[in-house]
Each structure stands twice: as structure tokens, then as C-alpha cells.
Amino acid sequence: MSQRDGALAVLKVLREAGHSAYFAGGCVRDLLLGRTPKDWDVATSATPEQVTQLFRRTLAIGAAFGVIKVLWRPGQEYEVATYRTEGDYSDGRRPDQVHYSTSPKEDVERRDFTLNALLLDPAPGPSPRPEEEGAERHEREDGVVLDFVGGVPDLRAGLIKAVGDPHERFKEDRLRMLRAVRFAARFGFAIEAATQLAIQAHAKEIKVVSVERIVNELDGIWGSGRAAPGEQRLEEVGLWAGLSAFFPSRSKVASERLLRLDQLPSSPEVPLSPADRTILAWALLLEGDRRALEQAMRSLKFSRDRIDQVLALVELAPTLMALETEAEPRVRRLVSRGGAMARWFQLCLLPPAHPGISRFSAMVEELAARPLPEKPLAGGAELKALGVAPGPDFKRYLGAVDDAVYARQISTREEALALLERLVKDGLSAS
């Protein structure tokens, strides 16, 4: 059973129990854009208690806001949300009060953007249901799209437009301003004029949003494949100014670097995932010494793993920019240790005509034809066997072996042991 079939089964259970139910939000939007939905969400007149009674396995992930997750089958989980209206947002994030409704029209009118406020009836009857009065109906092979807010024409025009008064939508949840830019970047859409003016009016208020939510939206922009226009749009609507406290070390040449990131190819042979693009974007955006960068990324609540990934790339930047003058062993070390991410980073960092790019590419081809050993050829055990006591000299001896590997002077364990014997005999520690 496919994800869509499972969602149809959930919707059928709700309807057979006498409740109104439709597919809602992002899945409808994606279907209209010719994309495969990642999630199939259902909006219904059934209350959370009624949903829980109808299905054997559920999770109350957002019961206070009318959201129940239905665990239909292994790997098939669906969010079922009760139609609702909302009160004021005193904290600029969540409604103070939620009132359940039996009206799908009331439910979509409290959503953020028109492209996310569409419903799909996958099993329409011979005549519209009473609760569908006032909706524009758009027939498709997979059902009828119900549009109460003008979302279909906005989608066709490539517009991100707030539902109702954009000032009210952004006062309710300031994060929606960043979401508008993310959707514009993701789909290559424009932001409708009144919606953009409202973002500009409230842009400085973005600082009240938690950094975790901000970073999550920015990650979506950087990984979209349209990071450069996304970054430009953030500037145009004034959101960068509101985010300045989080980005004290933003690169002055970020735009041109992000444009090269967007132009990077991605293929089954050399995949470049949205997660890869996100790491590369942060490394291209941030600059400064290690301590300042680490502090900035901690303030962004980055994981330790992400901090290490970004720092590793940023610290490669000076070497990559001077690549044409680096000694061959050092270039080979850089290519082999940095791997694909270092290669992608270099292509983003340097202009296409930079001589270092061709040298880097040639080294990639050379290493593909003649790979270096996957594991160290010698270690501490071999040094101990030669009578060397553990200490600072260990690193110097093993570093010399490492250098010889990258210089293509040795390539086997036997050669490494012979080199260590010579080094110990000649007294490297005294040199």
C-alpha cells in the first residue's frame, strides 16, 4: 500500500464515521505543482477525541491544537487535524486559544499562505457537499481541489501570498516571514507585493523568534538549490537586518559564492543532497577566526557535528584559494582528506577561471586512477616494536610516513616499516 493509498484509507474511515475530511496543505500544493508529496495531511471536522476513538494506534502530537498522528501501518503515519479557528497570538508564535470548527472554510482562512490553504476531495460525490459552499472547484483526475482563498490562481502565477491581511498573519507568527522567503526560494516564486510590504514592515521583529526555528527555515533556503536568490530576497525584505545579531561574521561575498553553489551539478554518480548544500552554504556565509566562528555557530544552536563540518571547510579556504602555488603532496593530502565536500566547496569558493580549480580537478582524477592507501600504513605498535617510547616523537615519526605517502614515495606497509626503521636509526627526534 502506497503512502497515498494509506492516506485515502484514513480519510475513508473518517468519512464513513460521518465526519467531513479532506487532504490539506502541502500535499495538495505539491500535487498541483506536479511534485510527489512527502506528507499526506488530513483536515477533518472530527475532534481529537473522536479521531483517537476511530483509529487503533494514535499519538497526540499536538492535541492542544487539534492534531493527532494516526499510525496506520508501519512506515505510514498521517497527521489528522481538526478544523479550527484561533485566538490572539500573544507570544508571536502560538495561538492563545483554539476553537474547533465544522467548517473547512474557517480552517483554511487561518493558514499562512494561499498555496498552503487548499483542500483536495479525492472522492467527490455527484454534487458538492454543503460545507464546500463558497469554494472555487478545480476538477482533476485525482479529485476536486477546493479553493476558498484564491490559492490556485496564485499557484499558477507563481506567487507567495498571505491568506487575508498579511500584517495580521505575520503578527500572529513572525516566523512566517522567513517561511515566505523559503517557499519563494524552493519553488522559484515571487512574493506578492502586499505580502512583501508587510514583511518589510515587520522584518525587525524576527528577532523574537527562537534561533532553532530561524535556522530550520534558513536551512530550507540553503538546501533548496536556489540559495543565492533566497539570500538576495532576505536582503530585499529587510530580514538580514533583523538577523544581524546571529550573523556577526557574514561574508561580504556570500552572494556570488551562493550563486556558484546553486550552479553545482548533482547526479546519481556524484550526488549533492540538500543537506550537503546546507553545510556548504553555512561555510560560504560565515568567516572569521576559529574561536569567533565556533561561538557564532553555538549561538545558532548548531550540533557539534555540524560545527565541525563547517569549521573544517572554512579552515580549508585559505589553502584552497592559494591552491595553484601549493606543493603537490599538500594538494594531494587536501584532496584525499577533504573528499567530495572539499571539492564542492572549492568550486563555490573560487571563480570558474581560477587556476586552482583545474589543478584540484586533475588531482581528483589522479587519485581516482591511483588511490592512496585507505588505512595508515604504520602506527604506534610498529614504533614500540622499534623501541620508541610513547611521546611527542610518535607524531613526528608517523607524520613523516604520512608525508611520504602523499608524496607518492611509499605505498605499501613494507615500505612504511623500512622508512620508520631508517628514521629511528638516523634519530629523527634529535633532528
Image (cartoon, rainbow, N blue to C red):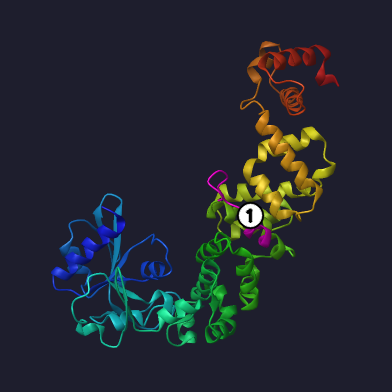
Question: Main SS of the magenta segment?
Answer: loop
Q: What is the secondary structure assignment of the residue under circle 1?
A: loop
- Judging depth in this view, the residue of 196 and 272 nearest the camera is 272
Is residue 350 in view from this perspective? yes
Q: How many marks?
A: 1
Give the residue displayed 19% in from the left and 76% down from the top: 125
Q: Observer-nearest residue: 58 or 143? A: 143
Q: Is residue 106 magenta?
A: no
Q: What residue type is labelled 1?
A: Leu
Q: Residue furthest left?
A: 17
Q: Where is residue 158 in the image (x, y as percent from the top left)?
A: 50, 76
Please provide percent x and percent y for residue 338.
66, 41
Magenta highlight range: 258-272
Residue under label 1, please give it.
264
Task: Answer with left or right where residue 426 lies relative to residue 300.
Answer: right
Q: In this view, does 377 lie above or below 132?
A: above
